[in-house]
Amino acid sequence: MMAQYLALKAQAQDCLLFYRMGDFFEMFFEDAKIAAACLDIALTARGEHGGAAIPMCGVPVHSAEGYLARLIKAGHRVAIADQTETPAEAKKRGGSKALVARGIIRVVTAGTLTEEALLDARAANWCVAIGEAGGGVALAAADISTGRFELIETSAASLTTELARLNPAETIAAEDSAFAEFTTSLRPKPGFDSVRGEARLRDLYGVATLDGFGQFSRAALAAAGGLVAYLGHNAKGALPFLRPPVLRLSAQAMAIDAATRESLELTATTSGSRKGSLLDAVDRTVTGAGARALAADIGAPLVDRAAIEARLDLVQLLCEDSGLRESLRATLRALPDIGRALGRLAAGRGSPRDLGQLRDGLDGAWRLGEKLEDLLSPVRPSPGSARTGMELLTDLAPRLRGHGALIDLLTRALVASPPIDASDGGYIAPGYDAALDDLRDAGAGGRRAIAALEADYRARTGIAALKIKHNGVLGYHIEVAARVADALMAPDSGFTHRQTLAGVVRFNAPELHEVAVKVSQAGAHALAAEAAHLEDLTHAALDRREAIAATADALARLDASAGLAERACEGGWVRPTLVDHACFDVEGGRHPVVEDALAKRGERFVANDCKLSEDSRLWLVTGPNMGGKSTFLRQNALIAVLAQAGSYVPASAATLGLVDRLFSRVGASDNLARGRSTFMVEMVETAAILAQATPRSFVILDEVGRGTSTYDGLAIAWAVVEAIHEDNRCRCLFATHYHELTRLAERCEALSLHHVRAREWKGDLVLLHEVSEGPADRSYGLAVARLAGLSPATLARAKAVLAKLEAGRAKTGGIAAGLDDLPLFATAREEEPPPADPVRETLAAIDVDALTPRDALEQLYRLKGLL
């Protein structure tokens, strides 16, 4: 047995090996030590190997999913080694002592999960491959729990942005990849060959050319090939369900880099929790599929105005028609997750319950489609006419129908509530198969005969407590108490002794044996018949997998839209007006997460306007800490995300120009693993903004330069403001405590000054959280320190130091003295050529090959003289 185990462990390589032994998955050696520590289970020993005891631990097969979930969450990969033949087949092959053959049937990793218990119902589970070929970079992303398959054309600079959007559970690349630092594991390079990748895709979809799916680059084909090879390796050749690949370009969605996603907490907080994020504050969906669709929308806001307007039209319809919205949400709430049920069936890990979920989900979708068709019929456009505002609904409604034959088949074939475990049968409905019904009747008749025998035996023996029982070893047998067993032990009693236990004795009898054989045969044949039907029904469902997946997508889109409509009505949100020119005009804007938190405390959020235009596209916002500057910056960035995701926004009115890239430099922390201080992280993020922001971008910057000395920080902040104003020319909100920056308003025509209001009243600071025009009169730093609880002595000392500093500033003109004479950013670069370097110029003019030794010596003296 250990020889078989070690051979399988060699195949499993770096995976923990679950080795099936009876009703347990056992682990040995180092695997056992790792699993016992991770799962908090007992570590024991079994036999010896090399003169030392073999560490061992195990988990029950029936509860293995829970243990698998904990191992996967801890970052481990698990190979499942199960029996590939029955004990009877092993005995027939090699005699009574033959070892049952085992093989690795599956490798379980974070990105290849399909089990319901191992997945978050409200989050996608992406497995991503990075492909590199022909100087290009692309990603292949698959969520095998639903079959979604995307090929994403990107660039080296945008790779991290796309990975941040997907937030994959697992990322792979070739062994020599230039992006190894972003992966969870590296795979053999031949798997990422683009020619092989193209061939794999053609074989997978049974086509001669991929032109029908789109024009894929060599890098995209390399990524797809690597991903398909990896999925096939983990499933041991049985590829999971993958829908035809959808080609996506980075430019099709608002670009949001990883730092911006983290600082804005779009789908998770900085601590990794969903609670407290924008997604959590917005999500009112009633299905897991709808929640996944909404997360994808917020993670990748659209830049196509027509597509955004179509989403907004549907949200508006459901906002205005509360009866339709409530009816739709009630119907959706009752529907199972047919996308993931289909994924389990396609992966070969489906159950009768998954087929029942398909039946119920498709039937509910059909009924919902009929309601929507009735709603659409009065307004359906005639051929050649303009589309109505219900464009998206018109596209979605037909996808909900068309499964009538499959629904009818599954309704006739399955019981009302099919079980998860198929091994005990009982999931095929009576009346579906007459032969199966006959087998069941034979079994039921046999069980009635056994009950009659039990009564007869009691009468014949006079033992009232005599019982006929069944177990897996003896089958059907007669059981009596030991104190009355002597009568049945007599040779002429008609009973045969089988087993003696403490307190009971077990017997057999010829009549019981005959009836038991009939019952067992009927039961075995019935189970085999049900298993055959299960296989046929699964094939029938998988034959329509593309249409079923389209229905699942339509239900998810309806749920996401209805949830957004519910949130809009709940919070008094408005539909944004989208325009083609670069503007950002928000009246009464609010931060949805902060507003929710305040509402729970019975407090009111102070709404603020933000009006960015060509003449005022850069706002410099000053004011005290705790005054609301950061909240104001973030709320406007979130409004842009929500609007382009197709949602209403928390404001009184909003007119927005589309944003191609969103940048946020709000707060930072050390990245010790990469040797970066807080200030270094801040500078890296700021450099990325200045290099990538376009006139259509939206940028929020908070306290740039605060992580270094006052003079350095002010100089950097000054230069960054000028660069954004003169070069990037994007819409920008810039919060700062450097009041010296307000002087730039005199020289930058598109920069305007604003501040968050605060007042001191009887020695106390009152923060008004209102944004007003003009610069702040002062920073109120000492007042904020008093609010924070600094001791009176410390505050008094700080006040004295401040008085000295301000007196010195008045004499010298402040730390910004002389900056008014500086030319603007672009002009400065033109007017300040690099200083001449005579040594370099002389060296550049020397023709080394033409020098004699004497000339060389003279030139050396000359250079030394210049130095």
Image (spheres, rainbow, N blue to C red):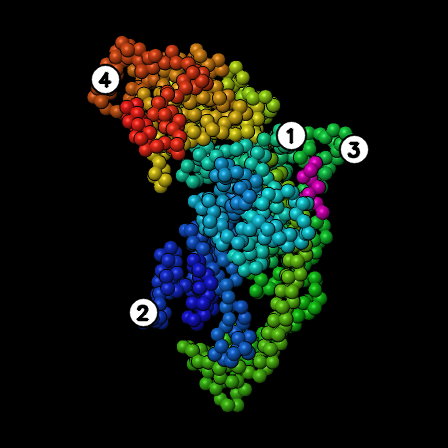
Instruction: Identify the residue at horizontal 33%, vertical 12% (top origin).
Output: 817
Q: Earlier in the sequence, mark 3 or mark 4?
A: 3
Residue 471, x across and y down, in percent = 51, 73
Q: Are marks 2 and 1 in contact (CB under 8 Å)?
A: no
Does residue 797 lie above or below 275 as drawn? above
Looking at the image, residue 744 sits to the left or right of residue 535; the answer is left
User: Of the residues shown, which amino acid type is indicated by label 3?
Assistant: Pro
Q: Secondary structure at mark 3?
A: loop
Does residue 311 lie above or below 521 as drawn? above
Magenta-drawn stretch contains 395? yes
Q: CA distance from mark 4 to mark 1?
A: 59 Å
**Badge 1 is on which residue?**
306
Magenta span: 394-402
Q: Quadrant of residue 310?
A: top right
If the image is split into quadrants, where does the N terminus sit?
Answer: bottom left
Q: Secondary structure at mark 1?
A: helix
User: Of the residues shown, which amino acid type is indicated by label 1?
Assistant: Ala
Looking at the image, residue 817 sits to the left or right of residue 644; the answer is left
Q: CA distance from mark 3 to mark 4?
A: 79 Å
**Badge 4 is on which residue?**
801
**In the rendered image, is residue 766 in sight?**
no
Residue 528, x across and y down, in percent = 63, 68
**Badge 3 is on which residue?**
383
Instruction: Identify the residue at horizontal 51%, vertical 41% (top origin).
Output: 166
Q: Earlier in the sequence, mark 4 or mark 2?
A: 2
Residue 724, x across and y down, in percent = 46, 22
